[in-house]
Amino acid sequence: MIDAHAALTRAHRDEWARVVATLAKRFGNLDTAEEAAAEAFATAAERWPVDGIPPQPGAWLTTTATRKAIDRIRRESTRDARHREAMLVYETEPEPLGVIDDDRLRLIFICCHPALAAEARVALTLRMVGGLSVPEIARAFRVQETTMGARITRAKAKIQAAGIPYRVPAADDLPGRVTGVLAVLFLIFNEGYLATGPDTAPVREDLTTEAIRLARLLHSLLPDDGEATGMLALMLLTDARRSARVSSTGELVPLAQQDRGSWDAALIEEGHALVRERLATGTAPGRYQLLAAINAVHTDGDAPDWSQVVALYDQLLRLDASPVVRLNRAIAVGERDGAEAGLALIDEVGPALDGYHAYHAARAGLLARLGRTDASRAAYDAAIGLAGNTAEVAYLARRRAETWDV
């Protein structure tokens, strides 16, 4: 017999976005859709252990959520007018699927409407489609939970006030929405690959798998879009290393120390082929294409060519001079030119990244290589205090302990 809790967890992963998308279209309100979906899952948590798991969990959840939404509308003060409107939407024949035939991807495009600010689009989609909690999204953006909660609330209110329609975007609308969609998929994948939270597994395979599935769908939808291709390649080359990334003791394993024989060769070959495909076009690469190319260098041969990596980061800096990109380039310079050169560049970007654990971890490693043990331990302490991934914390704690032996 399938465990009810396991079935509910799987249903949340597989059906949350589909239920929300269906209700958003029927009732024209994201708050109604999200709240009714949450109530449906809460009801399932009560009923499934008693009544058994329904043959079609998704259909059960959608029906239950629809009833919850209608009940909620009936209870409101303006229930008569809104109830008639809701039922009219509910009873209308569904419109054709159009160019997008996947519920989750369609909902992503809807949430990425250009009327919303870029950060609001990403945050709203992570909440509505990815099912991520407000704390998880806040960590991804490195902002306070209250700030992120307010941002999501404002985005939903703007959709409602502006009367943004809950319909499938037309083919001509797709290119203008791709940037926001790619940003969402990237954050969903990253949250899965470096999951945060004390009670969270180091890697959330459900999120990485879903992000890759959607990236494949987007690539098939827009095969000539270089950044959609680059995003898919980046995810494949990163996910190929997943099995080697966490040790049997639950500790993060840095790329240089991973067992390359355990990497997924098929995913690496597919990712490399996509990178070569984009290079063959002769067009200037975008951000995700360059990140994919960097990962291709890391997964080619026994050790990366750090001169190539630095050269690719130089190109990326011309498109994205963010502190994180500058930090990653500095780390690559440290591998190519030595710890002193890398540390000098890292210290230049430090003021902008003081609250970012990877900055302190990178400094700690370079300081240890230079024999500056006290400063290294202090940097490791800062990194450990900021890191939210359990495997990463374990790795940093061991590296800190080892500085005593330098």
Image (cartoon, grey):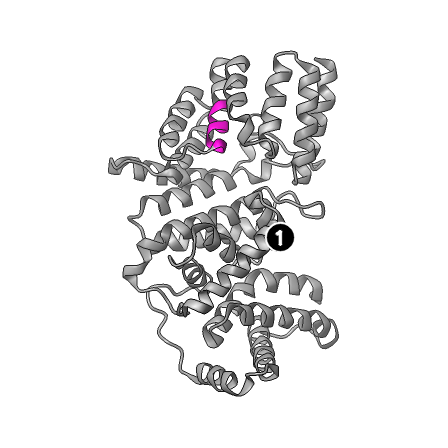
Question: In the image, residue 325 lies at what x, y percent?
Answer: 46, 31
Residue drawn 37% across the image and 57% down it: 114
Kindly identify the residue that appears in the image at 39 percent across and 36 percent down.
272
The stretch drawn in magenta includes residue 329: yes
Is residue 352 positioned above or below 148 on the image? Answer: above
Residue 256 locus on image (x, y percent): 55, 25
Magenta-span inclusion, residue 271: no
Q: On screen, 135 above or below 267?
A: below
Quadrant in which the C terminus appears = top right
Q: Measured from the top left, where is residue 207 in percent x and y?
A: 55, 51
Using residue 173 as the reference point, say whether residue 325 is left or right of it: right
Which one is nearer the viewer's eye here, 116 or 203?
116
Residue nearest the observer in this picture, 56 or 377: 377
Q: Which residues are magenta?
A: 323-330
Residue that badge 1 annotates: 146
Q: Is residue 230 visible?
A: yes
The image quadrant that residue 262 belongs to is top right
Q: Work out whether 57 lies above or below 129.
A: below
At label 1, counting other C-alpha atoms closer than 10 Å, the crowd grade (few under 14, some 14-19, many 20 or more) is few
Residue nearer the viewer, 171 or 346: 346
Label 1 element class:
helix
Q: Does residue 184 lie above or below 238 as drawn?
A: below
Residue at position x 55%, y 15% from top? 339
What type of secondary structure mainly makes up the magenta span?
helix
At label 1, the amino acid type is: Thr
Q: Position of residue 219 (x, y in %)?
A: 36, 51
User: Can see residue 302?
Assistant: no
